Image: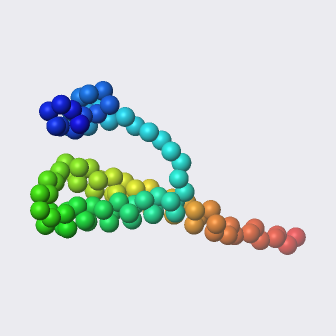
Amino acid sequence: MGASGSIRDRQGAPAAASKKHMKRINFTVTVEELRLLASLASDQLFRRQFIDPRMPGYKGSPEELDLGKALVGRMRLIIDDGSRHTTSAMARTPSKEREII
């Protein structure tokens, strides 16, 4: 935290300002790993939206909740797309019928 008590990024800028210029990263996961991450993130979002607000002293971040929901939605789209490709790759291709001459 900065001297004023606000959350700051690594360069010292307020965290809210750094959201405009988020750094993108890439990493490889399997469809199953992504499915697990999406499930865990969804559970955490549920907790933040419905359970945490009932706790004394709770200070929520609607922007963070919206960002999390959008991220889970994107992960689910990727999972659905990855599942279709995996299933279609495993599907048996019809064999060519022999021609009788």
Residue sitting at x 40%, y 37%: 24
Q: Quadrant of the N terminus?
A: top left
User: In this rendering, does residue 37 appear at all?
Assistant: yes
Residue 35 locus on image (x, y percent): 45, 63
Between residues 1 and 78, which one lies in front from this camera angle? 1
Task: Determine the image quadrant of residue 15.
Answer: top left
Q: Does residue 97 lie above or below 35 as drawn?
A: below
Residue 44 locus on image (x, y percent): 30, 62
Residue sitting at x 53%, y 53%: 29
Q: Does residue 6 lie above or below 90 as drawn?
A: above
Q: Is residue 33 left or right of residue 77?
A: right
Residue found farthest to the right: 101
Q: Is residue 74 left or right of residue 2?
A: right
Residue found farthest to the front: 3
Q: Does residue 46 lie above or below 21 as drawn?
A: below
Residue 51 locus on image (x, y percent): 20, 67
User: In this rendering, does residue 20 appear at all?
Assistant: no
Q: Quadrant of the C terminus?
A: bottom right
Residue sitting at x 38%, y 63%: 40
